[in-house]
Image: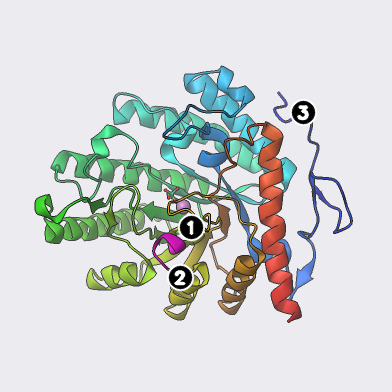
Amino acid sequence: MTWFKTISSVNFEGLHSNNPIAFKIYDSKERIDGKTMAEHMRFAVAYWHTFTMDGSDPFGKGTMMRPWERYSGMDLAKARLEAAFEFFTKLGVPYFCFHDIDIAPEEATLRETNRNIDVIVERMKDYMKSSNMKLLWNTANMFTHPRFVHGAASSNSADIFAYSAAKVKKGLEVAKELGAENYVFWGGREGYETLLNTNMQLELDNLGRFFHMAVDYAKEISYEGQFLIEPKPKEPTSHQYDFDVASGYAFLQNYGLEKQFKFNVEANHATLAGHSFEHELRYARVHGMLGSVDANQGHPLLGWDTDEFPTDLQMTTLAMYEILQNGGLGSGGLNFDAKVRRTSFEPEDLFRAHIAGMDSFAAGSRLHIKC
Ligand code: XUL
Ligand code: CO
């Protein structure tokens, strides 16, 4: 079935085009410094914002018109998957990223949830083969379900630590199965609200133990993708342990993990930490720790994670400068961890937003080379 009927494929038409569904600057084949734009940027679509989320916010219900939402359960997961690969192919991006429960519904037990994941992963493999799409990274959602109220690896409950470890175990198996080039840890609720009821030493030690277990298991199953930590200073917790690249790096060194991990730097997380995006990229780069990028931007007047599509050309220029100075992103890429606004609820808006983001990074790479 065709989900995006009004769109055929998105082509490069150049700056003089008035077609909203065309690239004005991003020309996947244009060569800059011996590499094509596609090779420099390695764009990825985030499954959660584009196919799973519905536009709801703390003040109102979802607004998104998503034709696949007429289904539920596994039928919904299968419809989303079909829509996702149609979207990737029409947009012309090489990569995508997902959390475990973005792609398959969560059930009462982990065994049943994993069974759902297996069904979708099997189909995903076929879609990947026929479309040539690759998985930039996958991750485990360890923050949405109420069981993670006190965190996952840093939870005060041994059961939750074990449950989280089992989720990551499955995530690494899926990463291997699908050839994920990286595996991401974003510490959603790995932090605290108040020190008065927090054993910080134990929580940090448990986080360190957890990452070592993940590294050991990857070795055991011969999964060779790059491990990435995605720092964020706060939200949802008031104090998150992986505050920024510098504190994350100190943590990794302290627990002897710095050789196994790099960073996935997100623009809006950088600004939440009181840094610029380019500061975080530079800090990671000069320590040889720049792994991948979550490409978005915050609102300059709002103090939370708005996850907007990146359109600030000064920011993309300074970011591409760091990436090019780094000699590229290696196995990483530019993942649009970004969502359309509640008012942009039509399916076609998903194309417009990604085109704007891709053109903005393409402009950033060109401006750098020309100056
Ligand atoms: C949350 C965030 C996550 C991670 C993956 O702010 O950025 O979506 O990228 O868990
Ligand atoms: Co992110």
Q: Is mark 3 within 8 Å of ligand 1?
A: no
Q: Quadrant of the N terminus?
A: top right
What residue span does the magenta drawing correspond to? 270-274
Residue 200 higher or lower than 128, as above or below: below
Q: Is residue 353 visible?
A: yes
Near mark 1 (Cα within 10 A), the count class, few <14, some 14-19 or many ≥20, is many
* Residue at numbered disc 3: 5
Q: What colour scheme was applied to this rendering of the protein? A: rainbow
| SS for callout 2 | helix
**In this picture, residue 10 sits left or right of residue 88:** right
The answer to if 84 sits in the magenta stretch is no
CA separation in Å, label 2 and label 3: 40 Å
Which label is found at residue 268?
Answer: 1
Mark toward the start of the polypeptide (2 vs 3): 3
* Nearer mark to the viewer, of 1 and 3: 1
Q: Which residue is mark 2?
A: 280
Q: How far from the left and from the top, in percent, is residue 116?
A: 43, 27
